[in-house]
Each structure stands twice: as C-alpha cells, then as structure tokens.
Amino acid sequence: MSYELITVRVEAGKVGIITLNRPKQLNALNDQLMSELGTALQAFDADSAIACTILTGSEKAFAAGADIGAMASYSFADAYKGDFITRNWEQIRSVRKPVIAAVSGFALGGGCELAMMCDFIIAADNAKFGQPEIKLGIIPGAGGTQRLPRAVGKAKAMDMALTGRMMDAVEAERAGLVSRVVPLDKLMDEALGAALMISEFSQIAVMAAKESVNRAFEGSLSDGVMFERRLFHALFATADQKEGMDAFVNKRKANFSHQ
Ligand code: HXC
C-alpha cells in the first residue's frame, strides 16, 4: 500500500511506526490523511507480526488540527450529511493493539484529539497541546470536550476549551494528559522502548489490559462524543464559523458577529 500524506515503517520486525507527513501544513489533518491513517492503523492491527504501533508527526508539529482551509466553506449540511469526522476518524478506536502517540511540537485541535485517541502519549519537551477551536467559532469535534476533561479534569479542560490557550509538556504531564516527557532527541527512542517492552508481553493480555482500561475511561463517552459531534456540525451553520476560518485563511484577525 502506498501513502501520500503519511509514511509507514516497521522497527525490529514488530513495531509499526506511522508518521504524519504534511510538513508544510504542520500536518493539518484533511480527509485524505485521515483515511490513509485509518487504513495504515488497521493494516498494522491485522498483521500478526506487529505488537504495537507508534503514531508521530514532525519535530515542529504532531498535528496543528483539522485542515481549516478544507473546512472553511463547509455548511451544516456538508458536515452533517457527510458525517464529517465520524466517517474517517473513528477507525483508530477499533484498533485492538496498543497505539502510542509520540508527540513533538504542536498538538492542537484535532491534533490534540488524535493524540488523545491513542492509548497513551509520550511527549517531547517542546510539545504544546491545545483546543483552539473556540478562536475559529467552533468547538472540538473529535472527542476533545469529552476526553480532555477525563484526562486533565474539568478545570483545566474548561480553561483550554474556553480560552484556547496551549499547555506545554510539563503542564501536560502534571495534569495527566501525557505519561512521560523526554528531550526532543530522545522521543522516538523512548516510544520505541515502550513499544518493544509491550511486544515482550502476551498479546492477549496486552489487548485485554487495553480494553479494560478503556472501559474505565469511556463510560458514556460515545454519547458524549455524539452530542459533541452534532453541536460541532451545527456550528457550520453560523456566520462566526465562516468568519473565524476565513480570517485564519486570510491571515487576519477574526471579527465575530455572534450570529
Ligand atoms: C490548515 C494550517 C493549519 C490548520 C497551520 N496551517 N495549521 N492549515 N489547517 N489547522 C498552515 C498555515 O496556514 C501555514 O500555511 C502553515 O501551516 C504554517 O503555519 P504558520 O501559522 O505559518 O506557523 P506558525 O506561525 O509557526 O504557527 C503555528 C500554529 C498556527 C500556532 C500552529 O499555524 C495555528 O494557529 N494553526 C491553527 C491551529 C488551530 O486553530 N487548530 C485547530 C483547527 S480546528 P501557509 O500556506 O501560510 O504557509 C480543528 C477542529 C477539529 O482542529 C475538529 C475535529 C477534527
């Protein structure tokens, strides 16, 4: 299988490594990239030689969010009828073997949500996490309003969702969003070390542990995500979404009319 917007390789014959590869756009997540990612994750999950997958980006950006240029002109009908996000973001949740996010640089909006969909996050010391959707006249749409409070508690999640501020790696570790912080040049070694350790264990026990921890974590997450999804779709009916995204695309300050 050949991919354009991700690269895929195998380390030590048993760890799959997927690298998001739209560097000029800071790995902004468009439809094609998410479809390729879903396919690659499913392929590693189905490969009996692979014990664990690492998902990573570039030094500057894990991913700076969903592709704003692609979304800017969406209507509510486009988002809702096209099943925006659900159609190609949810595959990662059906992967049964562990997926580790190795995050350096920006993990913003959908990028932060994608990292949170992984089983745990190892961060480089230059990592920055945030849900800046509010600045665009929308809200997180890939589980951010549900997974972030479960990871860091309501206070910080609310702070981040309402102000759009970023959290650095130290704060993210303190808050419980990431499991480890390492120097940037050690990020892949650390993630690979964790993946190789996992690969030594019983694959059945590993899958059971993952399933069980997710059970504790999820609760009524699906209802929450669906609720969020419909609100997210609805925001494409607002003038403020058009204004927020047009302002970003045209590199100007947004002037919201609150309509
Ligand atoms: C499309 C993006 C992008 C994005 C960056 N780029 N983020 N394009 N969608 N999310 C593009 C820029 O337009 C620019 O293209 C190039 O990447 C480099 O970005 P700069 O802004 O020049 O870099 P810098 O000054 O270093 O600032 C980095 C940044 C900033 C702080 C990360 O790019 C930024 O604020 N990006 C948007 C972050 C964001 O709002 N994310 C949430 C998106 S909404 P050109 O062509 O000018 O070089 C979202 C909804 C999720 O994710 C819903 C569920 C999926």
Image: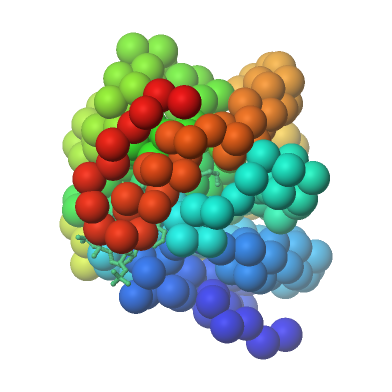
Q: How many marks?
A: 0
Query: Which is nearer the eye, 96 or 171?
Result: 171
Q: Position of residue 4 (x, y in %)?
A: 57, 83
The residue positioned 72% from the left and 85% from the top of the image is 1
Left or right: 23 in relation to 115 = left
Residue reaching furthest to the top? 155
Left or right: 89 in relation to 239 = right
The residue positioned 28% from the left and 26% from the top of the image is 163
Q: In which quarter of the image is residue 227?
A: top right
Q: Is residue 131 visible from the viewing direction of this image?
A: no
Query: Which is nearer the eye, 171 or 120?
Result: 171
The vertical placement of 22 against 100, above or below, is below
Ligand 1 occupies quarter: bottom left
The residue positioned 62% from the left and 26% from the top of the image is 231
Residue reaching furthest to the bottom? 2
Left or right: 100 in relation to 227 = left
Q: In which quarter of the image is residue 168?
A: top left
Q: Where is residue 174 in the image (x, y as percent from the top left)?
A: 26, 27
Q: Is residue 242 visible from the viewing direction of this image?
A: yes
Query: Which is nearer the eye, 185 or 167?
Result: 167
The residue positioned 42% from the left and 66% from the top of the image is 27
The vertical placement of 4 against 137, above or below, is below
Query: Which is nearer the eye, 93 or 244?
Result: 244
Q: Quadrant of residue 34?
A: bottom right
Q: Where is residue 149 in the image (x, y as percent from the top left)?
A: 46, 20
The vertical placement of 209 against 103, above or below, is above
Report the colour scheme: rainbow
